[in-house]
Image (cartoon, rainbow, N blue to C red):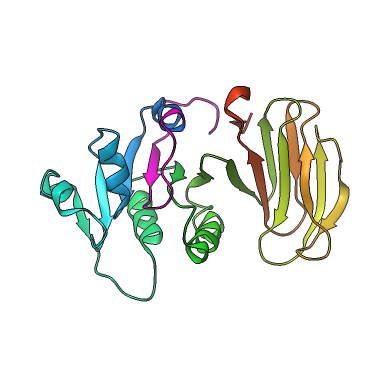
Amino acid sequence: MSRENADVVRALIVGNGERPSPALWEELMASAPLVLCADGGANTVHAYGVTPHAIVGDLDSLAPEIQKDIPTERLVRVDADNTGTDVQKVLHYAKGIGVQEAVLVGFTGGRTDHWLWNLSMLKVFGPSIALRIVDNYCEVRLVQDVLRLCACIGQKISLSPLGGAVEGIETSGLKFPLEGESLASGVRDGISNEVVGNPVEIRVGRGDLLVIVQREELLGPVCWDL
């Protein structure tokens, strides 16, 4: 996610949504992160032959045959209620053990309501943990000040406000540059821009801006925070 720093505690947080491809899983595991699961995300982790550091949630989605093979001290049971979701519970746990950077995988697909909710977690937990959501198709980060990344020439990037309008946006390295401009959902968007030079830099004056980079396996992974 960022420049290498041996002192940074990194985690791969796995949800019970669409599973990452084997190639994506291998890529995400390359940095040897702590593996944390939001409840049924442990089903995916088990399928890849990994024992997670912790499984957090009410455990209602965790397959019984998998649960019996997990050491009890790694099961962090948080009773179900209507005030939060499993992603919130596992992120609170991650924050409590000192995680500073995390990739969320398995939090897209299927339940659109959950997918939209999970995007809001980028803002809620952003001050404590540098987060990105990744699936087989794209990577999503939130920029509230400045964000830099390196991607392949021609790779598609979209800029989408999270919540209200975003003002004072300045970009470099993109085909359609923005120079102190604003974006607002349903009014003006930044869909399907593309990389023409590296590094790509995106600055925001005011508001919360989602940066969505389309993944293309043949082009290689995105490098963030140069």
**Nearest the eye: 214 or 58:** 214
**Nearest the eye: 10 or 137:** 137
On whether residue 193 falls in the magenta region, the answer is no
At x 67%, y 46%, the residue is: 211
Left/right placement of residue 173 relative to residue 124 reads: right
Left/right placement of residue 58 relative to residue 158 reads: left
On whether residue 12 falls in the magenta region, the answer is yes
On the image, the x and y values in percent for residue 119 come to 55, 57
Picture quadrant of residue 122: bottom right
Q: Which secondary structure class fits the magenta region best?
A: loop
Q: Which residues are magenta?
A: 1-23
**Nearest the eye: 145 or 135:** 135
At x 78%, y 66%, the residue is: 186
At x 53%, y 34%, the residue is: 1
Left/right placement of residue 49 relative to residue 126 reads: left
On the image, the x and y values in percent for residue 54 come to 25, 46
On the image, the x and y values in percent for residue 49 come to 25, 32
Picture quadrant of residue 58: bottom left
